[in-house]
Image (spheres, helix red, strand yellow):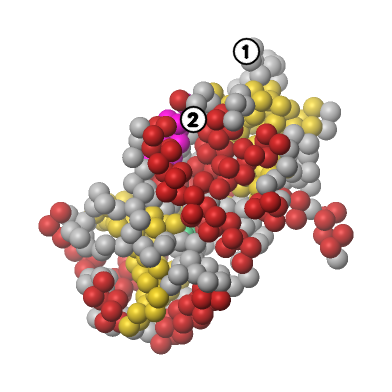
């Protein structure tokens, strides 16, 4: 077939570019709304979810200046139990969702001051979070270091296994009739100033009424998207370790434990199947996904300060992924400046948490042409030059 030649067969109403959890949930929800949906990705279910720890940390990852994002994070966290039940029913797959809560602890006076400030911020927003002494923290989690100075108990910040989540979404999409094109997308097709599908590696063209660009960090450099429309997402590398808790050591930790150690975030996420995920570095190094001795050392050193017993555990995997960072750390959702093109990218540290709400928001927008109220603040147009001139 000639490059650019339309592939025979029914055209899609929607083509989703990118098969990470964000692309998959968008495709699944769109297909459930009766839209003929296709998805292009060489390895659906891959992407950052293969590395992510899966913390659903709306409260413990609250940051100053991210109040608007907090609303979306909380909306998605609220939806998680129903979302998981529906997805597990639709796919027949277990997602590893665990409503275990989180303990954020402080190891020294600086960390303690930082946590106290976070606690004040959480309370200002009416979030559930309880201050505990070091002794109370260790009563909850006996493997914690004796030096822990205090902590925040957040019973509403849970976890899911992102690899299982991705697998369940692939199956749910297949069962809902999503057509998978397991190839790279070479470029967006634009016909008469409107997104009209995409050309795959090898030259086949997938025509579609609407196109959703949900390719994580790669969304920022898809050929064919006009420069002014390309989303400003950048890769932020995270190195992550996986250890295994042998049955004789269980329960090693009963909830997610995290801390800021000398300015770096470290978290330990214990799964029911014995996996213990330790993350994550945060590095602005372009597209590099090398696992480095320094990254592994930093994570093990900080995790060891928190939970000294981890040195006994088998280290089973190391990996690195790329978070799609946006200029304000919040996602870009909904219509782009090019008619027919929508974005679902820039989820940065919250891709797994924001999966349920993103699916709902994108399906609503694909069907109605309008972002729902809860997502208006996340329009990609907030970064467009015209918008900035109006607000100046
Ligand atoms: N949300 C965890 C991380 O981005 O490392």
Q: On the image, numbered disc 2 is attached to which residue?
A: 173
Quadrant of the drawing holding the N terminus: top right
Q: Quadrant of residue 67?
A: bottom right
Q: Residue at x 43, y 81 (%)?
A: 111
Q: Position of residue 53 (x, y in %)?
A: 40, 54
Say above or below: 276 vs 194: below
Q: Residue at x 20, y 60 (%)?
A: 251
In the image, taking residue 151 as reference, residue 177 lies left or right, namely right
- Note whether residue 110 is visible: yes
Nearest the camera: 186 or 135? Answer: 135
Q: Secondary structure at mark 2?
A: helix
State whether label 2 is within 8 Å of ligand 1. no
In the image, taking residue 184 as reference, residue 139 lies left or right, namely left
Q: Position of residue 217 (x, y in %)?
A: 59, 48
Q: Is residue 167 magenta?
A: yes
Q: Secondary structure at mark 1?
A: loop
Q: Residue at x 50, y 26 (%)?
A: 176
Of pointers 2 and 1, the one earlier in the residue sequence: 1
Quadrant of the drawing holding the C terminus: bottom right
State whether label 1 is within 8 Å of ligand 1. no
Question: In whole angstroms, how far apart are the C-alphas of marks 2 and 1?
Answer: 19 Å
Nearest the camera: 2 or 149? Answer: 149
Say above or below: 355 vs 315: above
Say above or below: 51 vs 8: below
Nearest the camera: 101 or 216? Answer: 101
Q: Position of residue 178 (x, y in %)?
A: 53, 26
> Crowdedness of circle 1 by 10 Å Cα count: few (<14), some, many (20+)?
few
Find the magenta span and give its range. Answer: 164-174
In the image, taking residue 193 as reference, residue 68 lies left or right, namely left
Q: Label for residue 9?
A: 1
């Amino acid at each position: 077939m000639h490059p650019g030649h339309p592939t025979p067969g029914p055209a899609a109403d929607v083509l989703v570019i990118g098969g990470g959890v964000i692309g998959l949930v968008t495709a699944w929800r769109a297909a459930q709304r009766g839209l003929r949906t296709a998805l292009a990705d060489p390895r659906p279910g891959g992407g950052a979810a293969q590395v992510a720890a899966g913390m659903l940390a709306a409260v413990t990852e609250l940051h100053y200046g991210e109040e608007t994002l907090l609303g979306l994070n909380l909306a998605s966290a609220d939806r998680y139990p129903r979302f998981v039940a529906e997805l597990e029913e639709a796919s027949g797959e277990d997602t590893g969702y665990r409503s275990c809560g989180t303990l954020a602890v402080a190891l020294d006076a600086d960390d303690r001051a930082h946590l106290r400030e976070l606690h004040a911020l959480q309370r200002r927003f009416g979030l559930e979070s309880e201050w505990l002494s070091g002794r109370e923290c260790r009563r909850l989690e006996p493997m914690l270091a004796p030096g822990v100075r205090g902590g925040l108990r957040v019973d509403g910040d849970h976890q899911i296994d992102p690899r299982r989540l991705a697998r369940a979404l692939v199956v749910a999409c297949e069962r809902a009739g999503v057509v998978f094109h397991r190839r790279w997308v070479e470029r967006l097709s634009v016909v008469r100033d409107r997104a009209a599908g995409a050309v795959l590696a090898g030259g086949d063209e997938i025509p579609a009424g609407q196109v959703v660009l949900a390719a994580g960090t790669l969304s920022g450099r898809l050929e064919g998207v006009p420069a002014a429309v390309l989303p400003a997402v950048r890769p932020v590398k995270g190195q992550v370790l996986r250890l295994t808790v042998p049955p004789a050591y269980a329960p090693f930790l009963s909830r997610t434990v995290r801390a800021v150690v000398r300015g770096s975030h470290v978290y330990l996420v214990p799964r029911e199947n014995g996996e213990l995920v330790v993350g994550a570095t945060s590095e602005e190094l372009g597209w590099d996904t090398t696992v480095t001795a320094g990254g592994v050392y930093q994570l093990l050193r900080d995790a060891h300060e928190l939970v000294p017993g981890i040195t006994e555990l088998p280290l089973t995997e190391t990996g690195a992924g790329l978070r799609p960072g946006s200029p304000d750390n919040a996602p870009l959702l909904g219509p782009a400046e090019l008619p027919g093109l929508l974005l679902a990218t820039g989820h940065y540290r919250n891709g797994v948490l924001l999966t349920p709400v993103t699916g709902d928001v994108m399906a609503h927008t694909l069907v109605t042409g309008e972002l729902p109220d809860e997502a208006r603040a996340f329009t990609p147009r907030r970064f467009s030059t015209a918008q900035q001139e109006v607000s100046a």
